[in-house]
Image: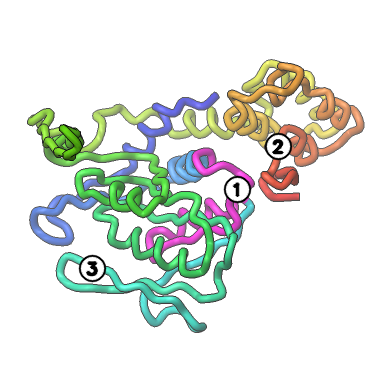
């Protein structure tokens, strides 16, 4: 299995802090170096896909503009459609529009009225969650279409600015890869009841500031990526896969075994606490996949054998619904 701590260290190592930008006193966290690094960008998308889960999203909505690259890549990864949520005047058709407050004024987001629909399962993606103004506007827009929001996913959360709380108050789950505090811990608020009266007590704990990011030594990016995606021809991450991969290489010497190994790694993660009625682990035995390998089937066919089932019973094949 991949090393989550090492993956997070890789991502943190590609986040650039820019002081006093875009104005004095602001510490801007620039994620463009993360996107420019193929290992870091790929790892971020992989982790987001694991957090969301395959087969439970119909469309991925990206918020203009920094949410677009992550949303598009995630949509491809999940076998879902990609929908853009844009600034005013950028969409040609009939739109829903939602205004929201900025620090020194207001702006708005727009979404095509026919982009989504009732019952569609949506994840909204942006790069950073700060005060939550943009996030809440995006949530309102999606809900106007009748669609159901599965999660609001971001690369980085800035908890001290309160955005996570605002999104959760809207009844939407927040999925984030990195969380950065700046300044002191937020106060702990306890809701106490005394003789039917609700009392709120605020306890500031502790007073010392937290670091904005963990102090880490960035490990070799290729090593992290190879552990997550697996290199072709390397030893399987699951010992029980070795006979299957040997048979695959027998018929297809140049086959990319990463596809099969990754499918089983993803299945093992998503079904790690599940058992068959017989009591066996969900992804074993590998009898079906082994039979297919003996028949000379290709890597994509073998990768579909352990794929998690969609809620309506359809299998995910090579990352898409079959």
Vertical comparison of 118 with 298: above or below: below
SS type, badge 2: loop
Kindly indicate the quadrant of the structure image that contains residue 245. top right
Q: Residue furthest front?
A: 195
Where does the N terminus fall, quadrant-wise? top right
Q: Residue 307 carries which label?
A: 2
| Residue found 44% across the figure and 76% down from its top | 96
Q: How far apart are marks 3 and 1 (CA)?
A: 32 Å
SS type, badge 1: loop
Q: Which residue lies furthest to the right in this view?
A: 295
Front one among 156 and 250? 156
Q: Position of residue 300 (x, y in %)?
A: 76, 41
Residue 205 in view: yes
The residue singled out by tag 3 in the image is 101
The residue singled out by tag 1 in the image is 56
Vertical comparison of 51 with 101: above or below: above
Kindly indicate the quadrant of the structure image that contains residue 268. top right
Q: Are marks 3 and 1 in contact (CB under 8 Å)?
A: no
Q: Is residue 259 magenta?
A: no
The mark closer to the camera, 3 or 2, is 3
Front one among 308 and 182? 308
The stretch of residues the image draws in magenta is 49-78
Q: Residues within 10 Å of mark 1 (few under 14, many from 20)?
A: some
Q: How crowded is mark 3: few (under 14 residues within 10 Å), some or many (20 or more)?
A: few
Q: Is residue 70 magenta?
A: yes
N-terminal of the two: label 2 or label 1? 1
Q: Is residue 281 left or right of residue 129?
A: right
């Amino acid at each position: 299995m991949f090393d989550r701590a090492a993956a997070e260290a890789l991502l943190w190592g590609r986040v650039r802090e820019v002081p006093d930008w875009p104005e004095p006193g602001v510490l801007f966290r620039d994620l463009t170096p993360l996107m420019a690094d193929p290992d870091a960008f790929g790892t971020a998308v992989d982790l987001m896909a694991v957090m969301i889960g395959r087969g439970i999203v119909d469309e991925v909505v990206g918020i203009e503009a920094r949410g677009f690259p992550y949303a598009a890549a995630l949509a491809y990864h999940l076998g879902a459609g990609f929908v853009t949520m844009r600034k005013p005047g950028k969409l040609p058709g009939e739109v829903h529009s939602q205004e929201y407050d900025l620090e020194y004024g207001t702006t708005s987001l727009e979404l095509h009225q026919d982009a989504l629909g009732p019952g569609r399962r949506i994840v909204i993606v942006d790069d950073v969650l700060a005060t939550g103004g943009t996030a809440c506007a995006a949530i309102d827009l999606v809900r106007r279409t009748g669609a159901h929001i599965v999660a609001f996913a971001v690369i980085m959360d800035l908890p001290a600015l309160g955005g996570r709380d605002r999104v959760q108050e809207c009844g939407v789950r927040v999925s984030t890869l990195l969380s950065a505090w700046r300044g002191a811990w937020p106060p702990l608020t306890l809701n106490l009841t005394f003789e039917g009266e609700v009392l709120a007590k605020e306890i500031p704990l502790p007073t010392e500031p937290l670091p904005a990011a963990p102090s880490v030594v960035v490990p070799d990016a290729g090593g992290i990526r190879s552990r997550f995606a697996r290199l072709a021809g390397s030893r399987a991450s699951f010992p029980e896969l070795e006979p299957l991969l040997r048979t695959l290489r027998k018929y297809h010497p140049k086959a990319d075994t990463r596809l099969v190994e990754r499918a089983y790694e993803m299945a093992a993660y998503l079904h790690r606490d599940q058992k068959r009625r017989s009591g066996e682990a969900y992804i074993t035995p590998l009898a079906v996949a082994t039979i297919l390998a003996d028949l000379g089937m290709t890597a994509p066919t073998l990768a579909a054998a352990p794929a998690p089932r969609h809620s309506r019973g359809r299998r995910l094949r090579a990352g898409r619904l079959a």
